[in-house]
Image: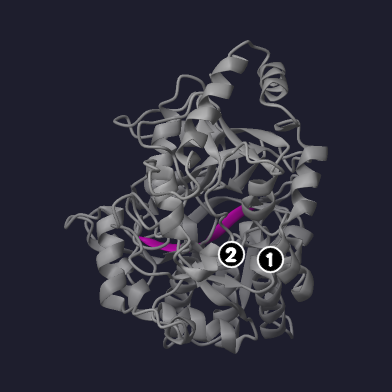
Amino acid sequence: MADPLRTDVLIAGGGLAGIVAATQCLRAGLSVTLIDRDTPERLGGLALWAFGGMALVDTPLQRRMKIPDSPERALRDWLSFGELGKADLWPRRWAEHYVQHSRAQVYDWLVGQGLKFLPAVTWVERGRYGEGNSVPRYHILWGSSRELARRMIAAMKEAGAGGRLTLLSGHRVTAIEHADGAVSGVQAIDETSGAAVRVDAPVVVLAMGGLNGSTDQAIANWPADRPRPAAMLNGAHPFADGRLHRFTAEQLGGQVTHAGEMWNYAAGFPHPQPHFPGHGLSTIPCKSALWLDHRGRRIGPEPLVTGFDTHDLCQRVAAQAKPWTWHLLNWRIAAKEFAISGAEHNQRLRDRQFLHFVRETVLGNHRLVRQMQRESAHFLVDDTLAGLAQKMNALTNSNDIAPAVLQATADAFDANFAKKDLALANDDQIRRILHARQWGPDRMRTCAPAPLQKKGAGPFIAIRMQLITRKSLGGLQTDLQSRVLRADGSAVSGLYCVGEAAGFGGGGASGKRSLEGTFLPGCILTAQAAAASITQGRTTT
């Protein structure tokens, strides 16, 4: 092994949390070495690929839209929806910190970095019975999370000019060195050459992502009291393998809590050009699509509708007889409502093409629908329901879908529209759609209720959907300075954990459910807390 590198701060992981922590430490005059397993062009982790939605509280944008939000209101929603108990001391404290500081330390801070938000706040995760977001809080970054990642990478490199920043891409931290209860650096390996590397540092910040970077990990961590899926797609980062979590727990006494809590999605399908084995795309499910079981029957008795309780959707999909479900819709619905989460398939937002973005929002994103029809074997299109049933059976190599059953499913829904108005409609999906359309920004992305077999709305579309991993809600337990805590409540000297690796604060700040959009801000807030603690009273080497 070559002579060790020396640095003030060692950061393990080049996602958003690690980059923000590095930037803040560099701005304070410290030297930083950042170790990241991925290639240099993929520095930024999932933030480079994410959509860029953020749950923020009492912002100028909310006030402009006359949304009556406050930290107190947001905390009530957070604790209720996440089902956080009194024993969840540090998760609750991080929830309180988030709602109190997301305006100043995320919204204002990002605007100060030159970033902008779309001039509308959308309303997600309302809860099945209103116990989720009681008001709209979902702010969308103009340029998507990719713009955020690129700007923060540039800020980090600018702050590290003059040789105070060392980037080691393609390297994996294998061990954290420690003595007398304090960390002293890390051991790493160059995954291309196999060469061992040692970095001496009095401070180590763990920013390696979550626990479920493989579907096997996610299923292994699945709570025993909930329906366990037989298979899942991977929408997380494949390097988020939990190794450093386990090392920290076994060698340093850190505590991994809420490992079984995850923020998965119920409607994913295989990526047509996968970046890694098992890679899936997560759709933003169409509210107006009928969600069917493997036999083409509508899942019920309460229909599955997105935008209210993602956690519940995942449990109900996991309980199905086969590891897939179907979305049945038509081209009219798909053009207005179909979307794929992330920067990759939201190029108008990602590339800040304003006129194209407005045009596709108003007139429909026919481009994306045609792209998926062309690229994905799981996105089926046909002029008739009988022809669609035949294609659905061919995809699953089965005779599960009887054409008569699929026709009856569509007919039963369309019966709600026997009259010209909806006075006699008695369908909970229609009620939820009407409720969603009362909020202007959501109205623009949600079709007015209409028969599935409405003349001129075709062709018909069926999408085979599967559960897909996304975020770990649990992680290493930390205090409000992002210091890693032992079981007795003491901090491991010199060891910090930020972002998803810490369950976005405290080892599981969201509890069982997120208010959606709490992840990017959680990365920023935990990283800022760590950097403030590290830089307080410290000098450069």
> Is the magenta region chiefly helix, strand or loop?
strand
Q: As shown in the figure, which amino acid type bears the numbered disc 2?
A: Met
Q: Earlier in the sequence, mark 1 or mark 2?
A: 1
Q: Quadrant of the C terminus?
A: bottom right
Q: Which residue is mark 1?
A: 362
Task: Please say if 105 is above or below 256.
Answer: below
Q: Position of residue 409 (x, y in %)?
A: 51, 26
Q: Position of residue 432 (x, y in %)?
A: 41, 51
Q: Is residue 508 left or right of residue 395?
A: left
Q: Which residues are magenta?
A: 181-188
210 or 330, which is in the foreground? 330
150 or 448, which is in the foreground? 448
| Disc 1/disc 2 C-alpha distance (Å) | 7 Å
Q: Which residue is mark 2?
A: 444
Q: As shown in the figure, which amino acid type bears the numbered disc 1?
A: Val
272 or 506, which is in the foreground? 272
- x 58%, y 13%: residue: 400
Callout 1 touching callout 2 (CB < 8 Å): yes
- x 62%, y 39%: residue: 329
